[in-house]
Image: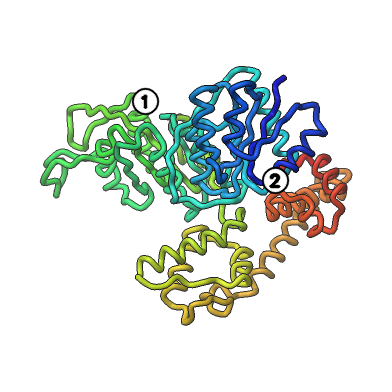
Amino acid sequence: MKAIWIIDDDKSIRWVFEKALARTDLNFKTFSSNKEALAAIKDEEPQVIVSDIRMPQGSGLELLQVIKEKYAHIPVIIMTAYSDLESAVAAFQGGAFEYLAKPFDVDQAIEIIHRAIDESLKQTNQEVLFENSTEMIGHAPSMQEVFRAIGRLSRSHATVLINGESGSGKELVASALHKHSPRADKPFIAINTAAIPKDLLESELFGHERGAFTGAQALRKGRFEQADGGTLFLDEIGDMPADLQTRLLRVLSDGQFYRVGGHNPIKVNVRVIAATHQDMEERVKAGLFREDLFHRLNVIRLRLPALRERAEDVPDLARHFLQQSAQQLGVEAKILSEDTLSYLSHLHWSGNVRQLENVCHWLTVMAPGQNIDIKDLPPELKNHDVHKEVLANWKDALKQEVQLALNKNQKDILTDLNQTFEKILIEEALSFTKGRRIEAAEMLGLGRNTLTRKVKELNIEK
């Protein structure tokens, strides 16, 4: 098999890969620049390329472009310390096999290389086109998965169902799916189906003819017509009235509908992206949502994590929203102290990203000084009883779990619960340290070897 090529101007990164790959049966070569690698490839092709995205003598994206033009069969893994949406989509735009955010776990990197090798041996290629966007921020692994999904869906016309709590940013995901799709030059129309009265929703979606009802003084195109050729985002789809569910199913089935009061069918070509905070399977079981419509919408499912599930993103989001609010008001952006950032990162955020955005706007307007400490936060965020409440809820949940197991005459309860407890601890620690095992082990009071063994025993994917 051909060699694995590692390209990075950072000597320490090359050294890490050299040590890791030396423990495998893989051949490898390292290069400090694109120039070296492009000169070498004229004489010898690699099996897989792992390249940094930003280097002084040419970016990894420039290299990726050359490789995809001349050696499309070679998988390219892009590394970056800038783990945001721009980096992820730029990598997928050029046809990268995978995207690896620094700092990364070495074992994870080797696993990705093995997958790339398998892919190259099958002589397949995944090419994804994607534009740059600065609307979404997320270092957390759960958000990186969302970025990857957006990248992989960027050439698709498939219907997508986004699950996520209120305020978690579902419309941003829908907008990104549209902007990085073949329909990007066509309209993106969004409508919150729960915010419009039932009597008006039908007309809002499908339009109406003049005189269709009292007050309909002129013909009006509905959202489906407005979105023709583009994307229609239906937010809070789980709350849609039953009769409109039937009409929506017909549109999704044959692409045509009638305006309210109309007699001529109207045919449109619309990609539907739906979103909900509801458990749709439960809504179907309860008879509140049509099962056939659910399956029509549930072609591709994306789960958007709650903000409390990606606490490491809070500092960057907060800084972003403070900058945004400052620009809107024409003032200098406030600065959050490290203690304040840490405090905000540990809050529950029941209102998710939208709540954090509102808090940042409040701080921009209301905080007296330029530097924000914990004492400057809104009163509702300074309630320390929040932590006691979370602790109490956790203990109550544990008691209920134990009681349930006892009632079932379950055996080895302590072993099972200990494994669950350890798995949650380790997963959260690794998430907090962004996969750095030595740091996670120290925080947990474990040795590195012990942590590695438990990761394997508990089937933890980190």
Q: Nearer the viewer, mark 1 or mark 2?
A: 2
| Residue 73 shown left or right of residue 266 in the figure | right
What is the count of numbered marks? 2
- Image position of 156 with respect to 212: above or below: above
Residue at 55% x, 71% y: name it.
336
Dot 2: few (<14), some (14–19), or many (≥20) neighbours within 10 Å?
few
| Residue 242 shown left or right of residue 152 in the figure | left
Residue 4, percent across and down? 69, 29
- Image position of 407 with respect to 273: above or below: below
Give the labeled residue for mark 2.
11
- Tell me if residue 293 can be seen: no
Q: Quadrant of the C terminus?
A: top right
Q: State the image quarter where residue 218 is shown.
A: top left
Residue 3, percent across and down? 70, 25
Give the labeled residue for mark 1.
253
- Tell me if residue 168 can be seen: yes
Q: Residue furthest top?
A: 122
- Image position of 237 with respect to 321: above or below: above
Could you tell me which secondary element the residue under label 1 belongs to? Answer: helix
Could you tell me which secondary element the residue under label 2 belongs to? Answer: helix
Nearer to the camera, 354 or 291: 354
User: Which mark, by number, is residue 123?
Assistant: none
Contact? badges 1 and 2 (CB < 8 Å): no
Residue 390, percent across and down? 67, 64
| Residue 185 shown left or right of residue 36 in the figure | left
Nearer to the camera, 430 or 47: 47
Residue at 46% x, 41% y: name it.
288
Residue at 57% x, 20% y: name it.
124
Q: State the image quarter where residue 111 is shown.
A: top right
- Which kind of residue does numbered mark 2 sit on? Lys
- Which kind of residue does numbered mark 1 sit on? Ser
